[in-house]
Image (tube, helix red, strand yellow):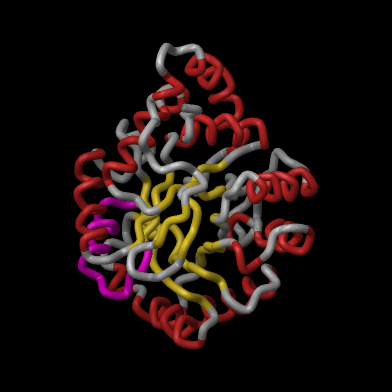
Amino acid sequence: MNDMDRRGFLKGTAGALAAAALMPGARGAAAGLPKPTDMRTLGKTGISCSYLGVGTGVRGSAPGITAQSMALSGSEYVGMLEHAYRKGVRYFDLADRYGSHHYMSEAMRRSIPRDEVMLLSKVWSREPDAVRRDLERMRGELSTDRIDVVLMHCVRNGEENWPETLRGAMDVLAEAKAKGHIRAHGVSCHSLQALERVPDEPWVDVVLARLNPFGVNMDGPPETVAGILKRARAAGKGLLGMKILGEGKPEVVSKMEESFRFAAEVGVDAMTIGFIGTAQMDEVMGRMAPPA
């Protein structure tokens, strides 16, 4: 898995955030860019979400579905989701593999109105029958009749021909969309070859891609990835960026305004960033929308 290691993010970014805050002009670097709470529309889907989405991925402690190793307790995790909502975040990035559905469900039960947020999740299975079963279970775990966006999770090396080899699973997602069980479908890419197929694949409503100007934990050179995503945007796909902070690498976090500007120039509709706690979330949101 290449999901964000939150504990590593925390350790790696604590010093970088402190150092960056002291840099002359750092607070003004993101001026003029979308604010984290700006509401955006995903391509031609008609689905709205905040520019910033809270990622919920952690590195799994075992390869099975929902296996995870969490640095936060359940109550702390739910509290962080509620804090994000109170701060204006309306996009929550989930996945079957993360084991985060029940935390989101609890947060919605406690305080987050379901109809005010976009829920994105991802299926790991590739076999059509397994995808169908997973979708039903996932809706139950989230206590919702409809998931806004569902992606094929981590389409990677060896799956370059996914529009052909994964067509059965894709058809299941299309069927779920026709039934109103999901609103949009697409792919989460972890391979340049897989990403290259996105712009010309009509089935893709939304793509989640690794993106930063430093090439850290990305599928290819930043300019190559940016070119593919601009083609996808021109084709009406919804664009979501991830690894904006390079999985918390200090050399990226210390220059996060450059990452925010690069993502905006590429034209992402929204971006996912994972956090280990509310203080870290507040710091990053402040850097995305510095005071005038």
Nearer to us in this view, 70 or 267:
267
* Quarter of the figure with residue 133: bottom right
Image position of 60 with respect to 22: above or below: below
Horizontally, residue 40 falls left or right of residue 6, namely left
Q: Position of residue 110 (x, y in %)?
A: 79, 59
Q: Position of residue 237 (x, y in %)?
A: 31, 64
Please give the name of the residue rendered at 47% of the width and 23% of the height, measured from the top-left corner: 250
Q: Which residues are magenta?
A: 191-206
Nearer to us in this view, 68 or 241:
241
Image position of 285 with respect to 200: above or below: above
Q: Position of residue 203 (x, y in %)?
A: 32, 75
Horizontally, residue 191 falls left or right of residue 289, namely left
Please give the name of the residue rendered at 48% of the width and 17% of the height, measured from the top-left corner: 20
- Does 68 appear in magenta? no
- Kindly report the secondary structure that dominates the magenta region of the rendered protein: loop
Q: Position of residue 207 (x, y in %)?
A: 36, 60
Image position of 289 with respect to 182: above or below: above
Q: Residue furthest front?
A: 292
Total number of numbered labels?
0
Please give the name of the residue rendered at 56% of the width and 63% of the height, measured from the top-left corner: 119
Please give the name of the residue rendered at 73% of the width and 50% of the height, measured from the top-left corner: 78
